[in-house]
Amino acid sequence: MKTRNDWETALRVIEKIEKAGFEAVIVGGAVRDHLLQRKIHDVDVATNALPMEIKKIFNNTVDVGIEHGTVIVLDEGSPIEVTTYRTDGTYTDYRRPEEVTFVRELPKDLERRDFTINAMAYTKDGGIIDLFGGKEDLENRIIRAVGDANSRFREDALRMLRAVRFVAQLGFSIEESTMKAIQKDSDLIEFIAHERIHMELSKMWVADYVYLGIEALVESHLANYLPGNFAEHLDEWKYFYTKKPEVGWAYLCLLNRNEMENIMEYYRYSNKEKYFAKNVLHVYDRLLNRWNEVDYFLNDLAILETAYDFAVWQGKTVPFSREHIAQVKKHLPIQSMDEFALNGHLLMKWTGKRGGPWIKEALDKALYAVLTGQVKNEEEQLKEWFYNEFIHER
């Protein structure tokens, strides 16, 4: 399935560029996914027109990377990135070229790309330009570097991790000489910004073949330079599956409890990912000792379900189904603290006492009593419970 609107928008953009006397094609992952009949996320256009020539053709453009040849065209509906054919200059940081040179020939642009399956172009008339055997590699389910693999990876070391990510997304294998090149240069991953590594792994967590990706991470030796003890925990990724990146980051913490803070720091977890991971691990620990009604009440359904999944992936025996979680949560007497009929002000009013630790103790016990059906969530009922149960017990 492709995003039909974006694809057709790109074809209209190409038509206008061709009418102006230039050539243009769809390039990159969109062509690959089109041939695989996968959903397409980004449709990019490459052209022999220079950025300023593109800006003259279209009325509504945005300069997002014009120094590297890219403008966004807005005229035809969906925003479409249009980039001038280019060659890259010298790479000095294993990530970006010092300069780019605009060229008029498509082959020169395609030969600088990472993998053969990403180095094809699609013409407006439906033709495929394939100079490096990308279609054959798609058929054989192989990830192969364009040209000399070592050169590609020394230009941009992140490409090594991208190869692993494509294994996880497509279920392909890395071609032998390409794998050997990654193994040889795997230490170069240390030159890559941790934020970029975070982005690649976030995409991998939500892929269909995560276990294969982790296998490739280990085989490529990249795992030797990344926190997470992937080789040691390889089998524990066998049943992992999610469509939420934060679940992958939380699972990595579960497998590396003693290094959790270091992992969060190295991979640049967002505050949301840190919160999610810490809460899931807490709830996971609680699950192993059996949840009570308060656990269901205090935690979001996503947290509870993820902790359940972790237990299953870890081979734990859980005496209820995943669907049971939502049912229990749905039938709790109250769904949020806003509905709770008791608060500290009422307790101080009833007793004439100042605030203190006793208030939290009373509220916690009252909440548990409501959630377990010992008392109705009504002020008078709670007042009676407070005097008869809480005060009496103290």
Image: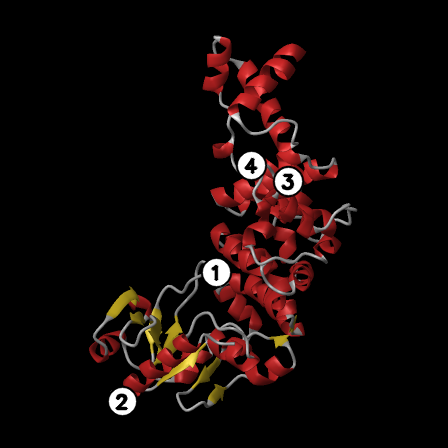
Q: Which residue is mark 4?
A: 334
Q: Nearer the viewer, mark 2 or mark 1?
A: 2
Q: Earlier in the sequence, mark 4 or mark 3?
A: 3
User: Which label is found at residue 1?
Assistant: none
Residue type at mark 4 is: Ile
Along the horizontal axis of the image, is 204 left or right of 73? right
Q: Can residue 103 be seen by looking at this rendering?
A: yes
Q: Amino acid at mark 2?
A: Lys
Earlier-in-chain disc, 2 versus 1: 2
Contact between labelled residues 2 and 3, with CB atoms less than 8 Å apart: no
| Residue lying at 48% horizontally and 79% vertically, measured from the top left | 31
The answer to whether residue 258 is left or right of residue 134 is: right
On the image, numbered disc 2 is attached to which residue? 19
* Alpha carbons under labels 4 and 3: distance apart: 25 Å
**Image height of 134 relative to 158, above or below:** below
Question: In the image shown, does 327 or 64 lie closer to the viewer?
Answer: 327
| Residue, disc 1 | 94
* Crowdedness near tag 1: few (<14), some (14–19) or many (≥20) residues, C-alpha within 10 Å: many
Q: What amino acid does circle 1 point to?
A: Tyr
Instruction: Determine which of the numbered discs, if any, sits on residue 281 in the image.
Output: 3
3 vs 2, front mark: 3
